[in-house]
Amino acid sequence: MEIHRYEKLWTAASLVIIVGFIATITYGTVVVGVAMVDDSGGTIDADSLNDHPEFGDPGVEATTTEDGEPAADAYVVARQYLFQPGTAEPITVPADTPVTFHVTSGDVTHGFSVVGTNVNTMVIPGQVAEITVEFSETGEYGLVCHEYCGAGHHDMAGSIEVVPRSEFFDDTEVNA
Amino acid sequence: MTFVDDYPDEARIVRYNLAVAFAALGIGGLFGMVQALHRTGVFRGVISSTDYYTLLTGHGVLLALVFTTFFLCALFTWGVTRSLGRGTVDYRFTQAWFWTMLAGSVLAAVAILGGLVAGIPTSADVLYTFYAPLQAHPLFYVGLALLVVGSWMAGLDWFRTYRAWRAENPDERIPLQTFMVLTTMLMWYLSSVGVAVEVLVFVLPWSLGLIPKVDPLLTRTLFWYFGHAVVYFWLLPAYFVWYTILPKLSGGRLFSDPLARVVFLLFLLLSTPVGFHHQYIDPGVPEGYKFLAMTNTMFLLLPSLLTAFTVVASMEHGARQRGGSGYLGWLRSLPWDSPAFVGATLAGLMFAAGGFSGMINAGMNINYLVHNTIWVPGHFHLTVGTAAALTFMAVTYWLFPQVSGKRLRHKSVALVQPYLWFLGMTLMSNAMHRAGLAGVPRRTAEPQYPDAGITFEGVVGGISEMRIQIAIGGTLLFVSLVLFLYVLVSTWLSSRTPTIDVSGALPDPLSGPSHSPAVLDNLRLWTAIAVLLVVLAYGVPLADMVMTDGLFGPGSVPFPE
Amino acid sequence: MSDETDRRTLLRVVIALAIGIPVLVEATTFAGLIDAQFGGGGGDDDSDGGDGTQTTREGVGVGDALPIDGATARLTDGALQQGDDAWTLALTVTVENTGDAPVSLGLETVTTAAGESAAGGATTDEIPPGETATVTETWRLAPNATPARLTVVTTTHGTERRSQASVVTLGKIPVSG
């Protein structure tokens, strides 16, 4: 098969770009350590969240990591058309601390997206989405549902409030 | 002799398919403009925000499923007939698939639009992805199933024609246009299995009350098994045009037939095993499968990059045939006063931009920044919305006279139309990309959130300016669409002319099929490899989902109940 | 003939607008992106892998003037010293009294981006009109802290003693050690 010289060059350049892209993404995964949302949250019964030990009373808990460092777990339930917590009251988390959001849905598929950050996950009934992040600045962030979930989808929003570390851990008992 | 005289039955079916395709485009496009004005807040007087989602479902289904499928069937029927030099084996079978597809489309449309009309008891406010546990009226699913089954029958029709030709031409290479049709349909059969299982085994019985719950993750995964490959069902007809017709429109010949075959085979192999890139931030799917989808997707860039080379090389050849010279000066010698050429070329140019934003979407961990923001519609309006849709409109200017025997009317309007589409789409898509980077969500009737006090901060430009740009772009697109329909309908309603001023002759490529290895035509081999790749990408994850909590769990009750 | 010329003119106008405006729009966007990446706020690159929130640091850096009333003050030195248990911020401000009455300037609280505060208190002596003085203070901060704001108190020692507190946003302070 005859391949024109320019076409060979172009194909080679294309493959270099493709491999380059794969390399940068791999770098982000392996070196920088950006983990993707996966199945580590396990499955759950969406119709009986109220009986669940954590999702039955969703909110933020202080905890520690394996090394004994302070951390936080935020349990959030997404429903039509609000986040619990998040909508009626902000989800309050500490700055400079690993915060793990555990998000699930009580009805249909929702989205959980913190505006202006890369905290972004799908929320699928029957699955628990886990995402661990660290906020380096205090302040208030908007929270939106970005997956169509019914007629009131555009009203589904809330906020995350990031407070100074000392303030959070003073007010909250550590739940190891 | 024109096509309509040589093959009157086939020409008729082509016209029917075009009619349905463009009727769907017109309605879907009208919805699009209403949506653009509504969500930007420019004008909300047409519908309520609740009905917005009905329109959005209609927009997606009519444009991404009905318009695209019917157009493909028109183009491929013409291409197979023309390249094999023979008509269908059984015209009644041809009619059967057309009416099946049409019946399905009408049912689905009624199911959707019933949501707007109080008297009709159906509704399907589920959007084109119909994620469970959102549930539509059963007619919606029946309609979609018939549309897909009809398309399977169409593929079978073309395979039968090919087999009949093969019996009389045992040693010849498959003509390029037919090769493209067959490989596209093989890819389609492999990929539509996913949505067929989703609908026929799970979601349709569930909507009829035969199954109490379905697993949202499993059904969603089956959809996306299909959901990426379907975009190639939309794009490969455009590639068909760019490879086999655009060179002639440019005044020249296709640069390389063998490379075109390689490209279509790459799509057959790689279109389906990439589906998890639509689920990068789904819980319940292990990261390893997402990573594999990422590498597969990056390699899927290759056939498109190769196409860019071949198409531009072919155009350059045509331009130089027309007297063009210089490094870039040859561009000016191209037929910029030919509506078909202009539309196909601007569509190809815009596809390059869409490809770049697609590369971002494919970048697994970058996806966190853009998933479900309005960046994503910004991307796909460049690809299906322009590369496919504008090419389809453009080639119709060239094709319709040949299948109807009528000269194109209002040529100056036809000439302005693609330029206007290009302008409108640039404005709209540019603003959508920027707004998406600021975090503005997609699929939302009112992305303003005044009660929650959320502000979106653009990296480049302000949010209100982006909104206005989307509204203007969307309106210009609709105007362009109206111009297209005006030209088409006027031509359709006019009388046959003794001659048409379009030549249907397609010259041979510069490098023909005899220069390519025969193994490229071994469709069984490539299909087998394609199946293997799909099993590797999906076998274990799907098995995992089924083994954890079973076929139907973990589920939740349907909505609306 | 003139029909043909009209047609070609129309075509040229259409092409100019339909290609020209998109090129303009995209070029403007591209320029804006380059500007946002490299131009905004001193061209620094604080990208923690963690949350991706990009901060544009417009604030007082070393060598910049402090935006306060009552005196002309400049941050003449600043350093953030790394340590295992704590990071130490040291700031030196040079004050010139451009007014009629003696002034003094004090460096008070530093607040970090994470919301922690550390108290200061060092102050200049009373500076006669036309004279210049410097003041240095150090603050003990948590490791990896980013100093965000500094409270400066300017006191005028005229017939009445008047104090004014200003909160100054800090820019990037060089990290050493």
Image (cartoon, grey):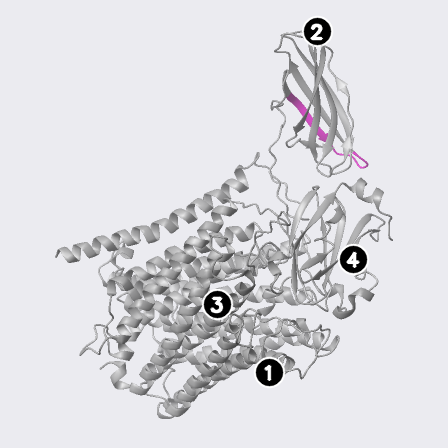
- Span highlighted in magenta in the image: C75-86
Q: Residue furthest front?
A: B119
Residues tagged 4 and 1 counted as in contact (Cβ below 8 A):
no
**Residue that mark 4 sits on:** A58
**Crowdedness near tag 1: few (<14), some (14–19) or many (≥20) residues, C-alpha within 10 Å:** some
In what quadrant of the picture does the N terminus of chain B appear?
bottom left
- State the image coordinates of residue B384 (x, y, percent, origin top left): 45, 66
**Crowdedness near tag 2: few (<14), some (14–19) or many (≥20) residues, C-alpha within 10 Å:** few
Between discs 1 and 3, the one toward the N terminus: 3
Could you say which quadrant of the image residue A139 lies in?
Answer: top right
Pair 1/3: label in front: 3
- State the image coordinates of residue B286 (x, y, percent, origin top left): 69, 66
Pair 4/1: label in front: 4
User: What residue type is disc 4 on?
Assistant: Pro
Q: CA distance from mark 3 to mark 2?
A: 76 Å
Q: CA distance from mark 3 to mark 4?
A: 37 Å
Q: CA distance from mark 2 to mark 4?
A: 60 Å
Chain label for disc 4 = A
User: What residue type is disc 3 on?
Assistant: His
- State the image coordinates of residue B551 (x, y, percent, origin top left): 70, 79
* Circle number at residue B200: 1
Q: Nearer the viewer, residue B128 or B241?
A: B128
Q: Residue at x 38, y 82 (%)?
A: B174
* Circle number at residue B59: 3
Q: Residue at x 77, y 21 (%)?
A: C121
Q: Nearer the viewer, residue B72 or A173?
A: A173
Answer left or right for C166 relative to B507. right
Q: CA distance from mark 1 to mark 2?
A: 90 Å
In what quadrant of the picture does the C terminus of chain B appear?
bottom right
**Residue that mark 2 sits on:** C159
Q: Nearer the viewer, residue C59 or C87?
A: C59
Residues tagged 1 and 3 counted as in contact (Cβ below 8 A):
no
